Image: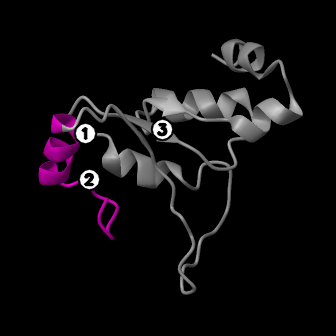
């Protein structure tokens, strides 16, 4: 991704050519001047910017705290996959909760 959060066609072509089929998108927030307002869907715009006309699946991360939020991200087309690692640590029945949130 470039600094504007857009997966360039040329980069997508190279990634597809190299058999990349999944991108885990994160804002990073590692730059000292980065100002990131954390909320349950704060990373989704970065992910949505990378979803495109290519076969690469894009995963959303970051403070996704319940099944409704995960489902909303998928329904809005902001990501192909939602990664909820910390949520699973807190609640092992997260899959059921996400299913029931549909």
Give the secondary structure at mark 3. Answer: strand
Q: At 24% from the left edge and 28% from the top edge, which residue is drawn? A: 55
Quadrant in which residue 93 is drawn: top right
Coloration of the structure image: one colour
56 displayed left or right of 81: left
Q: Nearer the viewer, residue 29 or 70?
A: 29
Measured along the vertical axis of the image, is residue 27 above or below residue 52? below
Answer yes or no: do the residues labelled 1 and 2 have beta carbons within 8 Å? yes
Measured as percent of width and height from the top left, residue 7 is found at 26, 53
For residue 25, side relative to residue 93 (left or right): left
Q: Which residues are magenta?
A: 1-17
Q: Residue at x 30, y 33 (%)?
A: 56
Q: Are marks 1 and 3 in contact (CB under 8 Å)?
A: no
What's the CA distance linking mark 1 and mark 2? 8 Å
Q: Outermost residue, front direction?
A: 18
Q: Which residue is label 3 attached to?
A: 59
Which residue appears at 68% of the width and 29% of the height? 68
Does residue 65 lie above or below 10 as drawn? above
């Amino acid at each position: 991704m470039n600094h504007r959060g857009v997966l360039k066609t040329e980069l997508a072509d190279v990634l597809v050519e190299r058999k990349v089929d999944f991108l885990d998108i994160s804002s990073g927030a590692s730059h000292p001047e980065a100002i990131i307002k954390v909320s349950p869907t704060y990373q989704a715009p970065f992910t949505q910017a990378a979803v495109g006309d290519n076969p690469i699946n894009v995963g959303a991360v970051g403070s996704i705290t319940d099944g409704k939020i995960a489902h909303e991200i998928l329904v809005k087309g902001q990501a192909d996959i939602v990664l909820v690692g910390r949520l699973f640590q807190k609640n092992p029945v997260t899959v059921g909760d996400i299913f029931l949130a549909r």
